[in-house]
Image: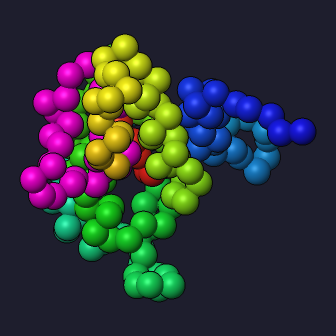
Amino acid sequence: ASTSIEPCLLNRLYELSHLRLPSPPTSAMSAQPAIAPSMISDPESASTESSTIQEEDVLPPKDFVAALPVREGWSGSLVQYKNYWFRPRLLERILLVKQAFVPRADDIILATQPKCGTTWLKALAFTITNRSRYGFSDHPLLTRHPQHVVPFIEIPVAGPNHTDIHTLPSPRLLATHTP
């Protein structure tokens, strides 16, 4: 017997499974976190992770990627960023998106691993979210591929059917393979 899991639940499970929480450094003498006095400058001015300026936000993506650890992959070199290995060109696009993408409260993001049914999930999600907008005879999926109606955030589609994700009406249905 197979079980069925709704796509929104799958997305939440994917987010939770890729959540990486930093563990505090511990002292060898005790199980208490070891925090050096130099780590705490001024508790009043302590900033959160979201408000700190990170190196990847300042350097041009190409320069930042060039400074990362490299290893050979099956089809070319890979660079390590936040414990994941990426193709350098893809990571450059991801960093550009990170700098420019402005999420909206009603965005629907389909986050999937490559080669695990992304196209199928895009078609289902698009059909469900637009069920009252299109009829059977004029549905966009009759003439367009799911990859064109649900664009990837990090991969711009070139050509006459280019979709600028910033101009899409709300709620936007977007996809990503980025962890």
Q: Position of residue 160 (x, y in %)?
A: 9, 53
Residue 168 in magenta stretch? yes
Residue at the extreme left: 160
Work out whether residue 136 or residue 103 is closer to the camera in this orientation and state it: 136
Instruction: Identify which residue, 104 or 124, lies in the foreground.
Output: 124
Coordinates of residue 74 in the picture (x, y in percent) = 51, 84
Image position of 163 (left or right of 152): left
The residue at the far right in this view is 1
Q: Which residues are magenta?
A: 146-173
Residue 172 location (% of width, % of height): 30, 27
Which residue is at the far top? 132
Residue 109 found in image quarter = top left
Q: Is residue 78 above or below residue 57?
A: below
Q: Is residue 76 left or right of residue 89?
A: right
Residue 171 in view (yes/no): no
Image spot of residue 6 (x, y percent): 64, 27
Of residue 7 and residue 42, the one placed in the foreground of this image is 7
Location of residue 81 (image quadrant): bottom left
Q: Count the marks: how many? A: 0
**Most common secondary structure along the magenta stretch:** loop
Q: Residue at x 28, y 54 (%)?
A: 155
The residue at 15%/58% (across/down) is: 158
Relative vertical location of residue 160 with respect to residue 164 in this rendering, above or below: below
Q: Is residue 134 left or right of residue 2?
A: left
Residue 9 colored magenta? no
Q: How is the image coloured?
A: rainbow
- What residue is rendered at 79% in x and 39% in y? 31
Visible residue check, residue 173? yes
Task: Give 147 or 62, whichever is nearer the viewer.
Answer: 147
**Residue visible at 90% across and 39% down?**
1
